[in-house]
Image: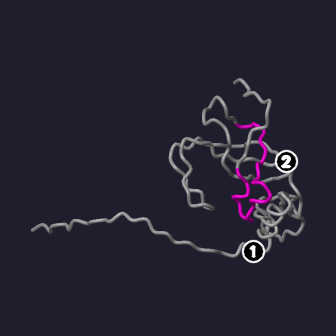
Amino acid sequence: MTKKEKELISIPITVNVPYRFAAGKYMTKFLMELKNNGKILAIKCPKCGRVQLPPRVVCAQCHVKNDEWVELSHEGTLVAFTIMYLPLTDPTTGKPHKPPFVYGSVRLDGATSVLDHLVNIEPTMDKVWVGMRCKVVLRPQKDRIGDLSDIRCLEPLPGQKKPRG
């Protein structure tokens, strides 16, 4: 005799779960410098020299305590990107970005790690490429709130042409 399976019924709902968490000493310093002075600070490992953004108390590679702060340039090189065709919810606002759009990783001059963010460029392979130079665009100082949304986007530096190949 076969046992009849019960039909499972699902009810799609959206759950709003607002929360706050402590940024910690290092991330607080990073966010406050960004908010108040428009500076991008990273942390340098005393052992291997790795410059990490966002700053971390302990080097991700050497596992030693970091305590040397360095100011980074607002310019860097796009090292990876994707053209998004599905909505992506911004974790700082809770609002989805309407596709298509470009999301990329830029290595700011002087950094070892990368900063991931929206890239303000037409989302076509003709317009974006690995190696493209970009700059960080901040909110106006009066509108900054002390979180990662103070970085509006990455923007390509003017006058570049995509290399052939």
Residue at mark 2: 109
For residue 24, which numbered disc appears in the image? 1
Q: Quadrant of residue 70?
A: bottom right
Q: Position of residue 82 (x, y in %)?
A: 61, 42
Vertical order, 83 against 43 (above or below): above
How many numbered circles does the render carry? 2
Q: Disc 2 marks which amino acid?
A: Asp
Q: Disc 1 marks which amino acid?
A: Gly
Q: Quadrant of residue 129?
A: top right
At 78% across and 65% down in the image, what residue appears? 31
Quick one: quadrant of the N terminus? bottom left
Q: Nearer the viewer, residue 58 or 86?
A: 86
Q: Position of residue 55 (x, y in %)?
A: 79, 64
SS at badge 2: loop
Is 131 within the magenta?
yes
Is 136 within the magenta?
yes
Say whether residue 163 is left or right of residue 123. right
Q: Nearer the viewer, residue 72 or 137?
A: 137
How far separated are the C-alphas under marks 1 and 2?
25 Å
Give the magenta-colored segment's residue range.
130-152
Vertical order, 71 against 23 (above or below): above
Q: Position of residue 11 (x, y in %)?
A: 32, 65
Colour convention: one colour
Q: Residue furthest left?
A: 1
Q: Residue furthest front?
A: 142
Vertical order, 108 against 33 (above or below): above
Q: Position of residue 160 (x, y in %)?
A: 78, 30
Q: Earlier in the sequence, mark 1 or mark 2?
A: 1
How many neighbours does mark 1 have within 10 angstroms: few (below 14), some (14-19), or many (20 or more)? Answer: few
SS at badge 1: helix
Quick one: quadrant of the C terminus? top right
At 82% across and 70% down in the image, what residue appears? 64
